[in-house]
Amino acid sequence: MGQQSLIYSFVARGTVILAEYTEFTGNFTSIASQCLQKLPASNNKFTYNCDGHTFNYLVDDGFTNGLYFVQPAYCVVAVESVGRQVPIAFLERVKDDFTKKYGGGKAATAVANSLNKEFGPKIKDQMQYCVDHPEEINKLAKVKAQVSEVKGVMMENIEKVLDRGEKIELLVDKTENLRSQAQDFKTQGTKVRRKMWLQNMKIKLIVLGIILALILVIVLSICHGFNCH
């Protein structure tokens, strides 16, 4: 990845650019500023293509700073061939740095370009890091994307079940049926064991009765009836 892969970056509050950094000149700064004013509210990540370059935006969820609600927006202009993962990863890193430094500070009231001296070097450092470590950035971005995708699928599956009350009821009914079947099986098992025990006792009593009868017959035959002496 060459030095020119990330061209220009800024941090804004609303449409007010607070800090920016670039080593190049051109009309990309005004184009990026114009796009910032027309970002849709449907998502927090956007990429626009223009003449072999991409204008990548990340809009933060925002944070409260005293009486003010601050919603920063981050932008980086990149060479289109670098793809989306490196620019978005760069914006995430800049966002983390900006939130740590200004989350409870002057981001809410700072005027245009007033944070250039303080935060411009940090933008430069992150830009250089992403340019120098593209493989690491791409790898981390892919892992993060896979985790997000898995979370999305899991949540979607749960929502599908919740949206269909019939299915939830069926699941509950099935569970209750399984419990009922288990209880019936346990009851039937107890009945079978009791029945087998009774049958065994009957057999034992019958055998005992036969043995006693045989003993009685033998005794009577020896004693010629009940006249034994």
Image (cartoon, rainbow, N blue to C red):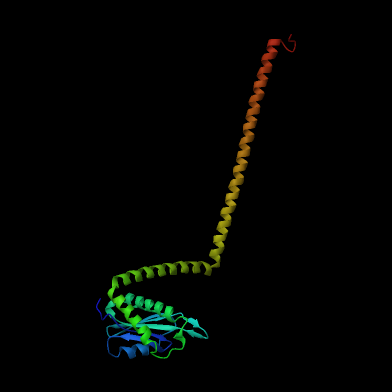
Q: Quadrant of residue 99?
A: bottom left
Q: Nearer the viewer, residue 46 or 221?
A: 46
- Residue 210 vs 45, above or below: the answer is above
Q: Nearer the viewer, residue 51 or 162?
A: 51
Q: Is residue 72 visible?
A: yes
Q: Quadrant of residue 151?
A: bottom left
Q: Residue furthest top?
A: 229
Q: Residue furthest left?
A: 2
Where is residue 94 drawn, in percent x and y?
Answer: 37, 79
How many discs mark residues in the rendered view? Answer: 0
Q: Quadrant of the C terminus?
A: top right
Q: Residue furthest front?
A: 118
- Residue 195 vs 147, above or below: the answer is above
In this rendering, would 59 be left or right of 198? left
In this rendering, would 174 be left or right of 137? right
Residue at 55% across, 67% down:
165
Residue at 60% across, 48% down:
184
Residue at 37% across, 83% down:
119
Residue at 69% across, 17% down:
216
Q: Quadrant of the N terminus?
A: bottom left
Where is residue 208 drawn, in percent x and y?
Answer: 65, 24
Q: Is residue 37 visible?
A: no
Q: Nearer the viewer, residue 104 or 90?
A: 104
Where is residue 15 drawn, in percent x and y?
Answer: 41, 89
Q: Quadrant of residue 177?
A: bottom right
